[in-house]
Image: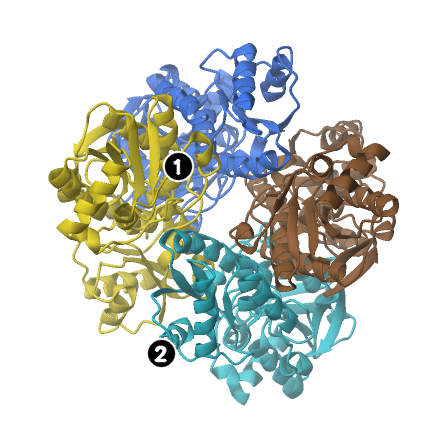
Chain colours: A blue, B brown, C yellow, D cyan
Amino acid sequence: MKRIGVFTSGGDAPGMNAAIRAVVRQAYALGVEVIGIRRGYAGMILGEMLPLGVRDVANILQRGGTILLTARSQEFMTEEGRAKAAEKLRAAGIEGLVAIGGDGTFRGAMRLLEEHRIPVVGVPGTIDNDLYGTDYTIGFDTAVNTALEAIDRIRDTAASHERVFFIEVMGRHAGFIALDVGLAGGAEVIALPEEPVDPQAVAETLLASQARGKTSSIVVVAEGAYPGGAAGLLEAIRAHMALEARVTVLGHIQRGGAPTAKDRVLASRLGAAAVEALTGGASGVMVGEVEGEVEITPLKEAVERRKDIRRDLLALSRVLAL
Amino acid sequence: MKRIGVFTSGGDAPGMNAAIRAVVRQAYALGVEVIGIRRGYAGMILGEMLPLGVRDVANILQRGGTILLTARSQEFMTEEGRAKAAEKLRAAGIEGLVAIGGDGTFRGAMRLLEEHRIPVVGVPGTIDNDLYGTDYTIGFDTAVNTALEAIDRIRDTAASHERVFFIEVMGRHAGFIALDVGLAGGAEVIALPEEPVDPQAVAETLLASQARGKTSSIVVVAEGAYPGGAAGLLEAIRAHMALEARVTVLGHIQRGGAPTAKDRVLASRLGAAAVEALTGGASGVMVGEVEGEVEITPLKEAVERRKDIRRDLLALSRVLAL
Amino acid sequence: MKRIGVFTSGGDAPGMNAAIRAVVRQAYALGVEVIGIRRGYAGMILGEMLPLGVRDVANILQRGGTILLTARSQEFMTEEGRAKAAEKLRAAGIEGLVAIGGDGTFRGAMRLLEEHRIPVVGVPGTIDNDLYGTDYTIGFDTAVNTALEAIDRIRDTAASHERVFFIEVMGRHAGFIALDVGLAGGAEVIALPEEPVDPQAVAETLLASQARGKTSSIVVVAEGAYPGGAAGLLEAIRAHMALEARVTVLGHIQRGGAPTAKDRVLASRLGAAAVEALTGGASGVMVGEVEGEVEITPLKEAVERRKDIRRDLLALSRVLAL
Amino acid sequence: MKRIGVFTSGGDAPGMNAAIRAVVRQAYALGVEVIGIRRGYAGMILGEMLPLGVRDVANILQRGGTILLTARSQEFMTEEGRAKAAEKLRAAGIEGLVAIGGDGTFRGAMRLLEEHRIPVVGVPGTIDNDLYGTDYTIGFDTAVNTALEAIDRIRDTAASHERVFFIEVMGRHAGFIALDVGLAGGAEVIALPEEPVDPQAVAETLLASQARGKTSSIVVVAEGAYPGGAAGLLEAIRAHMALEARVTVLGHIQRGGAPTAKDRVLASRLGAAAVEALTGGASGVMVGEVEGEVEITPLKEAVERRKDIRRDLLALSRVLAL
């Protein structure tokens, strides 16, 4: 392989730039050229490409977002769109792709591989941590720490006003962020999509907590844990107890910011590993870190197999939030 | 004066603890005892008081929230309630009060002074910066920096996705936070309660910005700038242009966290000055910092006179957000 | 077991308080009383003890340092000292100990167990990450992120002035902090105690980097990597090249601050696991997290076996710092 | 005026980029072209110049350092050097200069004006805050908050180990940083270049503090407050008391990082004001902010007149650090 492409797609995640840097520099070390494709699949179809040299990725290691931009593409959902994309890649002499993103990104890459035989290796870049085949995705650790910092701030107010706060964190289908943030933030209740959430049980927990003399509480709610998110859950609880509580939706602040050390190290490692895998002949796979080692997982498995949350940590959070 | 009381009331603000520390230690230096009153006027009525010595306020300078707690009190709105409060103060031998809070706090203090002749000096503690007689209120600088940090994060995502974000910051009646955050955050548009907000004009600004090649924008909206806040403004704008945009409401994260250097210095200075004023015979006044010097303003003026935003900075923000 | 003691000893580490909280609340859930011992072994000898209930550890999860304080004790190094300590523990009805700290702490605990048969379980709390039997020690992740934030700041200045900076991080015998910080901070050179450091080779790396057009560089040096630390290494390099460079020793800022999410989760988990192990009959062991699971390792091994740094990451850092 | 130049010189300061952005965009609004001069006076002599348009300064508002770089220049100290610089400016059609920096920068600008009649307006950009004619310099607020955060971390360790820490902050000739950081950080002692520092008196303060039961203390020392800085002062104190204490030199971390809101607002305002002043015919002056308003001061005064520290705040720090 003489020339590979790299792109980011889907929701941005802190550490994507660190991964791009690693792809470019590892490729350089192997004597392979790198072409950056802007705006994900949308830009691929339009041929928005630029060569990336070692100096082009200087000073981006610590930047949030993605210098290659990201976008959604309806056209890529069609066979014609993908054919156009494949044509542009061939015209540019790109022999293989490193795709940085989440499950939508990987599904697209799989179809490009199937339909047009373009070799592709995925790098897990999403704050949600919902990919099988890697213990952590790039961006997760930063998102958790950003949300935690917000909760630490809110706790100051909650304690001063002796109030209950419902804090909604990201996670439509996965509760990884909510679980870590809840445990690290000392939340009394953590509501996850993976576990049934019973408003009456939550009410009882809060009442018991009040009875023990606790005057303020934090309830962490993954956005997909209950219909209507944190606000929906609060309303449902009010059928079971009189509860004055505030709702804060952390929202997009969880996506941005300089990546943590862990996310930079992970992104550096996986970006480099993706290039090694791709140039070594691998394709249709994702590189991930499992129990400290780089592992390779078929994209299909990465996307389809369910990575479960640690239920022992959920149980622990209940013991510790006395 | 041999013994004074100190309390915090209304919304908590970073730096309140630094002010409490300064009150206690300045009083100690002057040979005056300090009684802390918990939960604002509610606790005053119930006699929730504790002596505060110099060691009791150790290690709180950097803490957000208020160690004295804060609460609302319906009972204090009644004459009976205030009579009870006055009685408790007298029973505790409290000869004067330092009231840390915003306009609601000061209105209560004024009535206590009128009806029961209890000397009181106010310290401006509110993130809103909406008190006359001080260039800055305690907590404002921290709130602005917290909101700014959130905007910096969101800008990473906005730039990567080439999107427009509407970010709602605190400020029901005052646009101080929105103005400083918007200017410091490079917002294309800043919507304030003090200025009429015309959705059509905002749409034109955003369209012109797009025409100049800008692919992402930040609109900062004070919660009271438009009916429905940031979401309301976005909807109104959509009558004038097709606009895909995200809304983030920063909410209560703006209240908490360790105070900035500026807020700690201001709180230290004003807490000490309040004790000097009170023990020196002043009453019915607020201590503030005006053009670098401590100044004394009647509580009535502090609450009733309007402190205007800097319209030159608003104009500047338009020049700089090209 | 009806009553256990908990203490912190050695250098403080962020997350020690989270571990204390977990010990107290897990013990409560199991019906076991907890006595906090202040000032480590020094306080044990003096009988400085206080009961810790669930409310006593409220609001400490996010605090740096240790509420139980820490100290060195010459007296505990003697047989008489340890006999006194054991006597105090027995007098207080303490049937087992949770020892939070690093290798010095564990060596002391082992002698207490040998000589006085006091059951003890260790919790790895040290920023150095130099204990066998756990992938990470409590405090390491926070220290790495604190050092990284400092390097991000220094890089601004290094880039603006086109200068080389030598930054010394903690690590007398272990390079874990230096390696992660260096890789995450994009250091051109990382000097570790585990690898021979050749000033001439470093000079060549820096000269090659300059030749490639790089105008500023960061060299990360573990304090024990070279005689005289970062300053010593710089001087040695000057024998091989003319190099104007600045030295910054990060020092004690790496110990403090609110723990990261990862450190809080780890501390919560290991604190709870220690109580389960101790009350379940384990002794003379450390609880650690290995490949995501709690594991038990004899204290002797934890202290004596060498945990090696990841040499593949060191190699990776060289590829990426082009 | 049709075309102006802008450059940064001397030590970098957070907010310099925000000032550059404001210069470029304000000039654009006035129909004036801007040329960026790289590497300060060194680059001026070499003719290192590039046109700066409104998009060239996008996304730099929040960045530390300076995109125009900064350097020292021996050659500019000579008449020949300055003649070359003037020639390059004329060749580039630059009719006036905005000089962002501290006193060294302004002295150079004054000579360029005298010898070659090149109009120049200064913008105060230095973390030291040691310029007359502005209440605050750009970068000061960020440097103070960075140092304060470091002290907050160190206090965790100081409190846990019950130790005394000597922390050296920047300030060879001026104690502004030390004073604000010391007051905001609750330092027991603050040593400034502006006040005689008596080791015996410091020893007595620390002994008195210990006698009152304080187990840990922070001493903040400006680097120029005592021969040898913090380490020198500690040694001198040891002649008067047995004192185990740690020294931390914060160093270059104080220069970098994203600017605070205050620094961004100040930089935006002064950058714009400099362009207005320069194009309006002003020269040989610095724009500053005094009591909330933009003011113009002759460069000679800005550099030569002494801005004094607030001695009342120093006195206050002694009352509060009980």
Q: Residues within 10 Å of mark 1 (few under 14, many from 20)?
A: many
Tell me, for residue D239, which label it has, or none.
Answer: 2
**Nearer to the camera, A206 or D213:** D213
Q: Which chain does tag 1 point to?
A: C
What separation in Å lies between label 2 and label 1 (alpha carbons)? 41 Å
Where residue B111 appears, x then y in whole percent?
85, 43
Q: Residue at x 51, y 30 (%)?
A: A11
Vertical order, B102 against D166 (above or below): above
- In this rendering, would C75 be left or right of B82? left
Q: Quadrant of residue B41?
A: top right
- In this rendering, would D78 be left or right of A4? right
Where residue A257 appears, x then y in whole percent?
51, 42
Vertical order, B154 against A224 (above or below): below
Badge 2 element:
loop
**Nearer to the camera, A269 or D131:** D131
Residue C173 visible to an observer of this rendering:
no
Q: Residue at x 45, y 58 (%)?
A: D213
Vertical order, A10 against A239 (above or below): below
Q: Amino acid at mark 1?
A: Ala
The residue carrying mark 1 is: C18
Q: Quadrant of residue B116?
A: top right
